Amino acid sequence: MRVTTRSMIDGLIANLQASQEAQDRLQNQITSGKRVNRPSDDPTAAWRGVRLRQDSAANTQYLRNMDDARAWLDTTDSALDGVQSTLAKIRELAVQTANDTYNATDRAEVSHQVNEMREHLMALLNSTNHAGQYVFSGMRTSTPAFTKDIAGNVLYQGDSSSIFREIGPGTTLAVNSFGDSFVTMFSDVNDLAHELVDPHGSSAKIALAIDKIDQSVEQVLNTRSDVGAKLVRIDFASDRLNNQQIEIGRIQSTNEDVDLADVLSKLTTQQSVYRITLEAAGRVMPYSLMDFLK
Amino acid sequence: MRTSFFGLNALLASLRAQQEAIDTTNHNIANANTEGFSRQVASMAPTAPYTLPSANRDSGLALQIGTGVEVTQIKRMRDQFNDVQLRQQATLESNSQTLADGLGQVEGLLNEPGDHGIQNLVSNFFNSWSDLANNPQSDASRAAVQQAGLGLVNWFNNIGAGLEQTRQDFDGAIALKARELNDTATQLAALNTVIKRTLSVGDSPNDLQDRRDLLLDKLANLTGATYRQELDGTTTVYVGGRVLVQGADTHLVTTEQVTLANGKQINQLEWDHDFLPVQVDGGELNALLQLRDEILPQKIDQVDALAGTIVQQVNAQHLQGVGKGPYAGTPGSPPPVPPNNFFDSTKVTATTMALDPLIAVDLQAIAAAGIPSNGEGDNRNALAMAALQNQAFAALGGLTINDYHASNVASLGAETRQVEQLSANQKILADHLRQRRESLSGVALDEEATSLIRYQRAYQAAARGISAMDEMLETIISRMGRVGL
């Protein structure tokens, strides 16, 4: 094929352009660290990249929701722990006074203590979480769960709505326990306190009151086991999500990240090609017949 | 019987012919770098021989004596067939190149996959509702929802405006290309006239034909125009099956501002003699028309569908809840004010999307609670809102918001990649044909240098021949019959 001066130069320019374009692309990959900078670089990888980011963002939120749920449940559990030990103390006192060796003054003293502990129970069941929400009030989270009226009766101010947290796609968990299941506990403790100072009271009646306290303790244990089960469920779910996040991160990296060693070696090769092309051109280009004609 | 001065003519003819050949070579050398130049070759042929009658000779055969040389034609080295092939290929090449560039622009706007695109802002938005569900009484959580909504709205506005601007840019480019088309057609018609005139007097209008070929190349790139060489030497050019240039006449194109059904304006290409629309089958103009009329509108529709669906579905969910404080009223009783939208419901495209004016100023109107509100901790609506992310919508073809966006990104990527690969392949083919053309029609300086030597030597030899004849004549004229003097 006949080769003209222009076709040689055009060919040279085209080759240099191609080499520079390749170098530019490789440098771009190195500086961004990404193999896929635009969807057209690899459409399937781009699709996967978008989906992985969506999943990762959603999982991060679920983990956050679980942390919040865990905090709520922990607050609930430690309050109920206090309630449980307070009730145990009350029971102990009641058992002691059921022993007829206590006189009226002693009983009055014990009754007073019981009333104090009743206040303590109320304070425990009015616990708030880190966000200042009353955890036993149902959805009335800005209102203390229990209050006392003028007559000294403990009233429940919350409602019976469950509060849910989303811990997975389409999966919710009710995190709260209702204070209203403890209303009878307060009146039972109140009754006990009255019983102790009742001149017509008897050990039998006190024993009955103690039974009622036991029922309340049973209630607390049930609620605590429910809370415990939920905490375990959250632990499992968050473990799984955490593992999933790690896996997502790994897939995303394989999907999009540049293999630096590979790209660097390609860039080096491309640079040599460029230099060699220039050198070859330098040897061939300058000469023509004109140089040798007199 | 021959005449004395017979040989001189042949040598003179040689001088003339070699001189002309050198002129042609000089012309080639001078135009070695001119775009579209085809090298020219002086074709020499012997002049008509002088026939000696046979009657006077024993053998009875006629005798032909050569009389010299002449340049019969200055040939233009050009392969018309290669030109046709190259132009067809160049049309395809410029078409896919323009498409690839246009789609590349759209990819740049969308900025996916990455941490700063629609995907990120949508995830952020729904997550902020989830955080609000954890803390419905918190003003900080509400502020986060409002900001996330604003961020989403701003980004959609940007992308919508960017896509629309790109579409308008293509529209402007079409108007410019139409002007270019007209200029080229006018020049071609003028060349047709001169070439026809030149040919009719028997000359070879080589350089004019080169210029005309350049214009035909340009038309091929621009519109995929087809052409036909007529017998009178003019070229008739067709665009979309209709005549653009015929002889000295042109039918130019014009643009008319037309308003589409969706209210947008475009420059419509029409023939200026009957205002029928111009059908452009290939080349840059066809690509620009595709980009402006099919590709960009499709991408705009997709983004609008996403924005519109988000506005409608979020609003529908928002109307099922109430905010806090004055919007909630007392727990358990119906809300004192009717529920409100989250986004402005009258603005459902990406470019116009906006927050509802109430939400923009009053955080308490953000509806985290259900109806009727059960208290400050009521997060039912916030939970439902966060779950919208995983819901499939008919308006999105039965996909969730996330899936719709991801599949649009993927198909844009696939479309662009395919066009880019097509463009690269077509470039290879076109370059190959260009090389063929250059190989035949291009100037090789070494070759021209040797031609110069060739013609120069022939010229010298002819001049020498004349000197020899001169000496011979000198013998006859000056020295014959001078015996003893």
Image: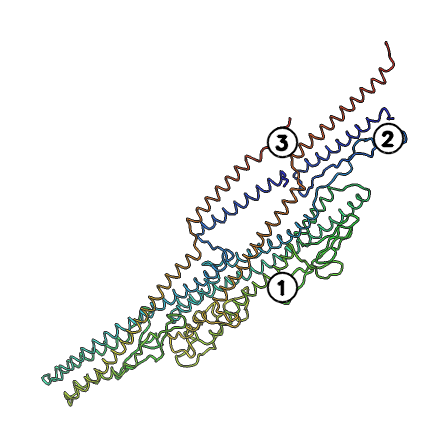
Query: How packed is label 3: few (under 14 Cα within 10 Å), some, or many (20 or more)?
Result: few
CA gap, disc 3 and disc 2: 52 Å
- Pick whichever, A216 or B363, lies toward us: A216
Left or right: residue A26 compared with residue B224: left
Q: Would you say the residues marked 3 and 2 are in contact, meaning their CB atoms lie under 8 Å apart?
A: no
Left or right: residue B354 compared with residue B210: left
Residue furthest to the top in view is B484
Q: Chain of mark 1?
A: B
Query: How packed is label 2: few (under 14 Cα within 10 Å), some, or many (20 or more)?
Result: few
Q: Please tell me which of labels 1 and 2 falls first in the chain.
A: 2
Residue B135 is at least partly visible in this image: no
The quarter of the displayed image where residue B31 is located: top right
Report the residue marked by disc 2.
B59
Q: Which mark is residue A289?
A: 3
Q: Identify residue type, mark 1.
A: Lys
Q: Position of residue B237 (x, y in %)?
A: 73, 53
Q: Identify residue type, mark 2.
A: Ser
Q: Position of residue B399 (x, y in %)?
A: 49, 69
Query: How packed is label 1: few (under 14 Cα within 10 Å), some, or many (20 or more)?
Result: few
Residue B340 is at least partly visible in this image: yes
Report the residue marked by disc 1.
B264
Instruction: Say above or below: A197 vs B205.
Output: below
Choose mark 3 or mark 1, whichever is in front: 3
Residue furthest to the right in view is B55
